[in-house]
């Protein structure tokens, strides 16, 4: 008779699945595990949702355990099928879809939900919370139709939502009930510094505002405040807090207060049922941060696995965050009171603020803004209760109180850090866990520690401390700090792979993986597309593009939308079109019932909502080149009117932009590339935040490189100033080919320039013979490329890929 017990997890979120991970390690065969999740997604990192909304991360990137993990570990999972009933007598759960599952042990990990203020009009269309992937998708969809967004709540969640909506092109106003932003995490000076930073990014703020009503008929139209002022809004995001999901627990007879009440071992009042995560209330506290939830999960996992464990005694929490690109940290009692003293430094020029709050000689709270390097060490002092009398300035400023000398060494700081210090807040990894990985599991590189413990695997903010701990524990045995492989399938980095392809004459993706000994014979969604690019870049006249190694967008030469339709963006050189071309686009859009035609930010027309089977027909009737709006290629060359019409124009920016775009219009690259040409220093074409921007000045042209206007805005840097149009072309083509040949796959020029440095690029392109050789190699490549739309139109075999029955082809993502 089998001794395997049945374990049911209600909730497929971070805390619950982390508990299951521990159980599988401690007692891999003790339970037959079944998981029910309310969302139709595998376990994902909810902390990273703001990155998805902002556009810097895909949903796939934030998945912690993909579907194969459940299968590999024998975990039965029912996604999108929440439990609606628990029979505590028969020990059975029933799901929304009618699945019955019996249990010996049941874990409640139902998490929390966004709190929606009970305002008149809160139930209108366009009023949402910000809690899950569906909320992100709703906001993305709204941004395509509407312009004005209001975010109620000036805490972290609200600011993250605002940043994402701003990136989606909406006009965003944040409404906050108190006098400064993030008042639960920052004091007034830090809050004001944060507000200034965010205002420079384009956010608007209404502070000390109380919302009275949400107005509109079916959909929200405006917010009315208690002072009777009004703010127009097409979308309202409430980010005013969370509430534990306890309805199922309450209906099942579990003791609840704010959350499901648990003891130190995560027991509820009903035998066989435990609770963990945001839905649990321990000693009167329901935690909303990841670290304490993971601590709870470890205790519960040990108990269920039969391992010895001390009970969970609660957590002292700290908050280390990146708010719209700004680093902030707070811990403990960071606000002043009559019985505390403070020491602080404030540098408005560099945007740095540091504050320590001291009571009875002990550090009780801290706030850091702009530079959060010392967050972990300050938090350790808060938790230890150590007397710091006489050392206050030394701790805050890093120098002894006497004046000269140096503060404690890195090794001393690492040694003083307690073992239970949470190093990676995203994944709840402690100092002790990293020490164990280094000392007992042979992890002697940051990459090995990341694979073993997940420390630094999410946002990466803890990587410097992980590196310091690695040095502290491993000493002289630290592994060579080599470049990580391009993916988990290989230890080879980009440069090694390119060198081996050239040296050994490797000509196919499969050949590269076989010869270089890939761990995964078929590769993965990271390495296959990158190898496909490197091979095409090295052998432009010989390599045949491998379609199955490309992402969906690039395989179908159109951007797939959330509803499964596609968008068509034809090439419009320099943003200049004609009445005849516009009539042609309008006629095709009308014929095929295209739901939306939109001007893009790159001066083109986007036909949205096209069915896949109609793509070749539309391309054929448009009879225009592909605009490559879907690929890692040249997207647009944006222009202003220059001296053709503008009274400020000094050069013909339209002619220059069209010339560059016609030359480069089929150029593939490691990542998407955007160019712009401005006819004068007023820079109406926004050339100084493009991958390459050409700016006209009196009698000359400036070339700016490495700019980015996306999630991480970066101003381009001046590469050179030239006098003639021919020189603009020469330097532009040479620079882009040098980027094509040296950047990593999926690395934008902004990140590439930051990595290698502008001086390196200037030095590489200084010799004209080198530039001309680069131009020649680019011309060879461009001479062997074809317009993909035209190729598919003329090849019946390729057209068959767009029939409704072609969906069974494997997708590289």
Image: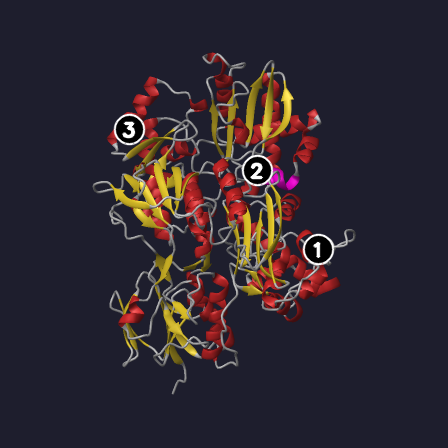
Q: Position of residue 724 (x, y in %)?
A: 61, 16
**Local crowd size for mark 1, using a 10 Å CA cut-off: few (<14), some (14–19), many (≥20):** some
Q: Which residue is mark 1?
A: 394
Looking at the picture, does residue 603 appear above or below residue 533? above
> Toward the viewer: 576 or 462?
462
Q: Disc 2 or 3, which lies upstream in sequence?
A: 3
- Magenta stretch? 750-756
Q: Badge 3 local density, few (<14 within 10 Å), some, or many (20+)?
A: some
Circle 3: element type: helix
Question: Which of the numbered marks, if any, corresponds to residue 588?
Answer: 3
Whole-angstrom CA distance, mark 1 to mark 2, is: 38 Å
Q: Residue furthest bottom?
A: 1
Q: Secondary structure at mark 2?
A: helix
- Point out the frontmost of discs 1 and 2: 1
Residue found at the far front of this picture: 338
Residue 585 visible (yes or no):
yes
Q: Helix or strand or loop: what does disc 1 sit on?
A: helix
Nearest the eye: 13 or 694:
13
Q: Nearer the viewer, residue 364 or 258?
A: 364
Horizontal and vertical percent for residue 637?
A: 48, 26
From this viewpoint, which residue is outermost toward the left? 217
Residue 576 position in % (x across, y down): 41, 20
Distance between mark 1 and mark 3 Cα atoms: 71 Å
Please tell me which of labels 1 and 2 falls first in the chain: 1
Identify which residue is drawn at 67% across, 57% down. 392
* First in sequence: mark 1 vs mark 3: 1
The image quarter containing residue 455 is bottom right
Q: Main secondary structure of the magenta part?
A: helix
Q: Quadrant of the N terminus?
A: bottom left
């Amino acid at each position: 008779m089998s001794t395997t017990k049945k374990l049911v997890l209600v909730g497929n979120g971070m805390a619950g699945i982390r508990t299951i991970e521990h159980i599988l390690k401690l007692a891999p065969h003790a339970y037959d595990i079944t998981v029910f999740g309310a969302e139709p997604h595998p376990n994902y990192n909810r902390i990273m949702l703001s990155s998805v909304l902002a556009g810097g991360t895909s949903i796939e990137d934030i998945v912690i355990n993909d579907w194969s993990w459940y299968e590999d570990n024998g975990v039965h999972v029912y996604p999108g099928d929440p439990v609606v009933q628990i029979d505590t007598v028969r020990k059975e759960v029933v799901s929304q879809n009618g699945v019955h599952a019996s249990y010996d042990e049941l874990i409640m990990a139902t998490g929390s939900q966004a709190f929606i203020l009970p305002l008149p009009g809160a139930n209108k269309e366009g009023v949402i919370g910000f809690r899950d992937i569906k909320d992100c998708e709703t906001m993305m969809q709204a941004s395509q139709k509407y312009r004005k967004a209001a975010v109620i709540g000036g805490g972290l969640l609200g600011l993250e939502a605002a940043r994402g909506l701003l990136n989606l092109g909406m006009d965003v106003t944040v409404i906050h009930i108190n006098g400064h932003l993030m008042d639960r995490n920052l004091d007034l000076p830090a809050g004001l510094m944060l507000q200034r930073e965010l205002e420079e990014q384009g956010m608007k703020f209404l502070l000390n505002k109380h919302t009275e009503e949400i107005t509109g008929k079916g959909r929200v139209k405006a917010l009315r405040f208690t002072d009777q002022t009004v703010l127009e809004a097409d979308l309202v995001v409430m980010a005013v807090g969370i509430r534990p999901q306890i309805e199922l627990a309450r209906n099942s007879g579990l003791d609840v207060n704010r959350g499901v009440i648990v003891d130190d071992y995560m027991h509820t009042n009903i035998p066989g049922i435990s609770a963990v995560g945001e839905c649990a209330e321990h000693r009167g506290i329901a935690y909303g941060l990841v670290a304490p939830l993971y601590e709870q999960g470890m205790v519960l996992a040990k108990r269920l696995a039969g391992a010895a464990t001390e009970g969970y005694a609660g957590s002292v929490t700290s908050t280390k965050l990146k708010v719209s690109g700004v680093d902030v940290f707070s811990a403990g009692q960071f606000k002043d009171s009559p019985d505390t003293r403070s020491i602080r430094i404030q540098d408005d020029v560099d945007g740095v603020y540091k504050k320590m709050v001291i009571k009875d000689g002990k550090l009780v709270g801290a706030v850091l803004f702009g530079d959060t390097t010392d967050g972990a060490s300050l938090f350790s002092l808060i938790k230890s209760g150590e007397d710091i009398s006489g050392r206050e300035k030394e701790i805050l400023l890093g120098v002894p109180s006497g004046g000269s000398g140096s503060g404690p060494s890195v090794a001393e700081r690492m040694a003083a850090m307690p073992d239970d210090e949470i190093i990676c807040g995203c994944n709840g990894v402690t100092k002790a866990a990293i020490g164990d990985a280094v000392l007992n599991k042979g992890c002697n590189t940051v990459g090995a520690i990341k694979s073993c413990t997940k420390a630094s695997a999410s946002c990466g903010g803890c990587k410097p401390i992980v590196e310091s701990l690695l040095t502290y524990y491993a000493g002289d045995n630290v592994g060579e700090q080599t470049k990580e492989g391009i993916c988990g399938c290989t230890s080879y980095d980009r440069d090694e792979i390119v060198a081996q392809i050239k040296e050994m004459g490797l000509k196919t993706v499969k050949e590269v993986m076989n010869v270089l000994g890939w761990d995964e014979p078929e590769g993965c969604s990271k390495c296959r597309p990158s190898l496909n690019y490197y091979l095409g870049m090295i052998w432009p006249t010989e390599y045949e593009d491998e379609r199955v190694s490309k992402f969906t967008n690039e395989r179908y030469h159109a951007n797939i939308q959330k509803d499964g339709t596609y968008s068509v963006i034809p090439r419009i050189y320099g943003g200049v079109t004609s009445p005849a071309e516009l009539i042609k686009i309008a006629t095709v859009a009308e014929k095929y019932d295209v739901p939306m035609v939109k001007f893009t930010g790159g001066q083109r027309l986007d036909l949205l909502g096209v069915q896949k089977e109609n793509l070749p027909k539309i391309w054929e009737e448009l009879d225009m080149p592909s605009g490559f709006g879907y690929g890692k290629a040249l997207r647009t060359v944006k222009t202003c009117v220059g001296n053709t019409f503008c009274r400020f124009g000094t050069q013909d920016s339209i002619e220059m932009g069209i010339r560059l775009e016609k030359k480069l219009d089929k150029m593939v690259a490691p990542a998407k590339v955007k160019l712009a040409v401005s006819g004068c220093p007023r820079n109406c074409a926004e050339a100084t935040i493009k991958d390459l921007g050409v700016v006209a000045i009196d009698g000359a042209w400036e070339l700016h490189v490495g700019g980015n206007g996306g999630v991480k805005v970066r101003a381009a840097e001046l590469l050179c100033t030239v006098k003639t149009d021919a020189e603009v072309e020469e330097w532009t083509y040479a620079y882009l080919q040098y980027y094509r040949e040296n950047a990593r796959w999926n690395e934008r020029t902004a990140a590439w320039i930051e990595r290698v440095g502008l001086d390196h690029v200037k030095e590489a392109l200084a010799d004209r013979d080198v530039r001309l050789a680069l131009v020649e190699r680019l011309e060879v490549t461009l001479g062997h490329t074809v317009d993909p739309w035209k190729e598919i139109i003329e090849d019946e075999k390729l057209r068959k890929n767009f029939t409704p029955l072609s969906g069974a082809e494997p997708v590289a993502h």
